[in-house]
Image (tube, rainbow, N blue to C red):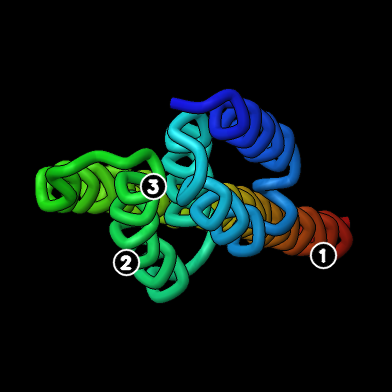
Amino acid sequence: LTTTKVVIDASFGALSCIALWWRRRWPFAVAVLCVVLGAFSTAGTMAGLLALGSLAVHRPVRPALVVSLLFVPSAVVCSLWLGRSNHWSVLLPSFALAAAVTAWGMFIRARRQLIATLLDRAQRAEAEQLERAERARLAERTRIAREMHDVLAHRISLVALHAGALEGAR
């Protein structure tokens, strides 16, 4: 490995790692940049995989699959650039890594969506339960008020009846 290649490898690896800072804001652009830089940097491979995983977590499946498919030729180009004789030995591991990272990111995304849905459903169920409890309290208060009204009306009519009877007895 020549000194120039080592400098390029380290520089591109550093740029890939620095680009990770913005992977949540622009996941697709950062993942593509890291994969392109990874074509000339073995140091940038892990940054590319991390950017790919972040893309799979934060964006729909299609962009993640595109970058995942770009990762394999990037690894082959890196193998050619480094002067390795067996380029085919890079295909299967790089494809397996890209597929595993993409699948793991999609799993995390699906799990987060499921948890958000379950949390939303739990909050709605709790709100409905509080509403039912409030309606039950209001219905009970109304029932008690009607009962008190009926009892009071009955007592007043008894008082009026007794007053009429006392008036007639005089």
Q: CA distance from mark 3 to mark 2?
A: 15 Å
Looking at the image, can residue 159 be seen? yes
Q: CA distance from mark 2 to mark 1?
A: 100 Å
- Dot in front, 1 or 3: 3
Looking at the image, can residue 120 be seen? no
Q: Residue at 84% x, 57% y: name it.
A: 163
Residue tagged 2 = 69
- Dot in front, 3 or 2: 3
The image's mark for residue 132 is none
The image's mark for residue 78 is 3
Q: CA distance from mark 1 to mark 3?
A: 111 Å
Q: Secondary structure at mark 1?
A: helix
Q: Secondary structure at mark 2?
A: helix
User: Eyeballing the image, is 146 above or below 17?
Assistant: below
Q: State the residue in front, 106 or 111.
A: 106
Give residue 13's position: percent from left, percent from top. 60, 32
Give residue 88's position: percent from left, percent from top. 11, 52
Q: State the residue in front, 151 or 66.
A: 66
Label 3 crowd bin: few (<14), some (14–19), many (20+), radius 10 Å = many
Quarter placement of the C terminus: bottom right
Three-letter code, disc 2: Leu
Q: Residue at 52% x, 64% y: name it.
A: 59
Three-letter code, disc 3: Cys
- Dot in front, 2 or 1: 2
